[in-house]
Image: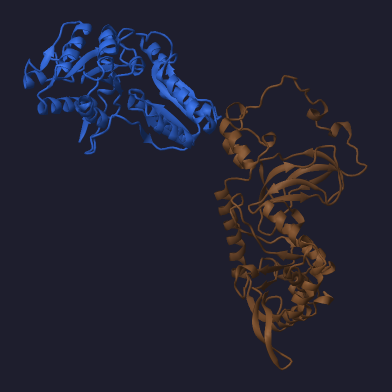
Chain colours: A blue, B brown
Amino acid sequence: MKISYREAMREAMREALATDPRVFLMGEDVGRYGGSYAVSKGFLEEFGPERIRDTPLSELAFVGAGIGAALGGMRPIVEVMTVNFSLLALDQIVNSAAALRHMSGGQFSVPLVIRMTTGAGRQLAAQHSHSLENWYAHVPGIRVLAPATIADARGMLAPALADPDPVIIFEHAQLYNMEDELRNDWQCDIGTARVRREGSQVSLITYGGSLPKTMQAATELAEAGISAEVVDLRVLRPLDSETIIASVQKTRRAVVVDEGWRSGSLAAEISARIMEQAFYELDAPVERVCSEEVPIPYAKHLEEAALPQVFKIVSAAKAVMGKS
Amino acid sequence: MIAFKLPSLGADMDEGTLLEWRVKPGDQVKRGDVVAVVDTTKTAVDVEIWETGTLFEILVHPGEKIPVGTVIATLLAPGEVLSPGEIPPARIAEPAATGVSQRRPVSPAARKHAEELGVNLDQVTGTGPGGAVTVEDVIKAAGGHPQDKAADMRRTIAIAMSRSKREIPHYYLSETIALGNAVAWLSKVNADRPVIERILMAALFLKAVARAAGQYPEMNGFYRDGQFSQAAAVHVGVAISLRGAALGGGLIAPALHDVAEKTPGEVMKGLSNLVQRARAGSLKSSELSDPTITVTNLGDQGVESVFGVIYPPQVALVGFGRICERPWALNGEIKLMPVVTASLAADHRVSDGHRGALFLARIRELLLRPEDL
């Protein structure tokens, strides 16, 4: 049966709420409005106001409350409307949630899951469209996930809730309406990257909202006679270097596709690792396809121009092959 | 102006990849000089030139794959001078080097591979970004993927051998030959020789076959277009198995020239040299294209007899098995005797069993009197 990414995520939360009384959902508009992206639609009626809690517009306060609940034995899912707004809660996430296990000498853990949307493409302009996954992937003490398939949307929440430490799940806004078959083997780990398409000449390494674009680019490259392998990172911290390096050792060429800005990006980290661990396997310098270094524009044509697109990925892959 | 075309380096070759030029425009060349190295599906071959003159222009560059017969260079005949109109303009004013020293782009993986394969990077054409040398370029310069190479060679052998069995009505004869005299003669001759110059039985076999082939011309030559033409000299093709990963195994039968005229010592020296070069991949074009009869010696691989498949367009193949001791009747007594089974596979379109038997008997006679070889 085909279901949407939104429905897959909703099913995952419904299962968690139904099977574990410690799980509750908290965030702006998650209850009466059904969630800004309608992921929790119907939950208030189904699970009641005790477990589906609308919060004031204060990320600092409600993320902090989530940390407290987790310390107290609950398994909260906190929804933040976009990664842009999560910056208001950075102090709670970085200085408290990520650090408490370390600072308490292992006495306290924070089994908190924070879900937030990320990414551009919906003309929501510079305060709702950024991709700041790398800010969180920089911080020791938290695990960062980027489900990019229906199966991962369905499967990643349960192991995230089972993790004794804080886990952040990034849901790209452009993926919610994506539909696909949900196969029976959707259960998954939250530690490894996956090869989504096998290829032999260039590795396209990506995650999140850029995965569908990258898969499309690989199809176009195949038509041009170039065999591209697509690696979906899935887990942005800790990075699965082994899968990345194994792919690059096979293809000898890499293009990293990342909707974040190039400077200080996850793409930068990945190309550094490839250089450190696979320098003598490389047949060309690593290429990056990232967002232009501007606040994401409102105008549709400017927004499109600022983001990674299929043609940019195709041309970067051709460039590392020595073709134009 | 003389056009120098890619020669056929064996009956089964229809294209080759130019690997390297050994000469440059302006060089004087004479008949027999090695001017280029060309990769066939079997091995890299040193190509000799058949004209004397001055190399004028190189038309095919390393890495290019071309059919047999393609003009690969032009030569000026001795005394020939070009009128100014004939000189291509680009060659009058070569652009001067810019003097900017820039490190040639070579990918890290290509550099590593070149070192492992012993490839000189200066001779590799780059096809990567900005003309960078890639792993594929290095592998191509080293003669291709070993597995491709092995598959190519297998295919080549398959084509030649299928053609042989399809077209040539083989007949087979065999004879066991007493080698007592030959063994005794060799140990006497070798007693005075340093180890590396010692003559092996294989050299006597080649010599005996060459001498016999000279007397039975219907064994020595080529069958083409429904007609047999006998060869003027005897160039014995020596079947050599290729070992080593770079070549991926396989079989090649290059010629040892004018064996009948050489002493056993010279034949031995030529044989060692030929085997060494065949395995190193540096055979000359004439050696690949002109064997007139083939000898296969499976002796050291432990079987007593071999019935070979004729290599077209040749018309005969002589095989030798393992030398072993057998009870042998001689002058009314039974004694132990080193013996070898010699076999003949011959083309019935050209000769009959009777002549084949006389030819094989002649080889036996020659091996019984090694001192006359």
In the image, B104: left or right of B23?
left
Q: Position of residue B158 (x, y in %)?
A: 58, 61
In the image, B276: left or right of A186?
right
State whether residue B131 appears in this view: yes
In the displayed structure, A267 sits above or below A253; it is above
In the displayed structure, A129 sits above or below B91; it is above
In the image, A284: left or right of A38?
right
Which of the pair A242/A291 is nearer the observer?
Answer: A242
Q: Picture quarter containing residue B221? A: bottom right
State whether residue A85 appears in this view: no
Q: Position of residue B46 (x, y in %)?
A: 74, 50
Counting every numbered tag in the picture gives 0
Q: Picture quarter containing residue A70? A: top left
- Residue pushed farthest front? A105
In the image, B321: left or right of A79?
right
In the displayed structure, A11 sits above or below B310; it is above
Q: Quadrant of the N terminus of chain B?
A: top right
Which of the pair A312/B104 is nearer the observer?
Answer: B104
- Residue pushed farthest bottom? B332
Q: Position of residue A289 (x, y in %)?
A: 44, 21
Q: Quadrant of the C terminus of chain B?
A: bottom right
Which of the pair B85/A257 is nearer the observer?
Answer: A257
Q: Picture quarter containing residue B358? A: bottom right
Q: Position of residue B290 (x, y in %)?
A: 75, 61
- Residue shown at the point (41%, 24%) measured from the top left: A310
In the displayed structure, A258 sits above or below B278; it is above
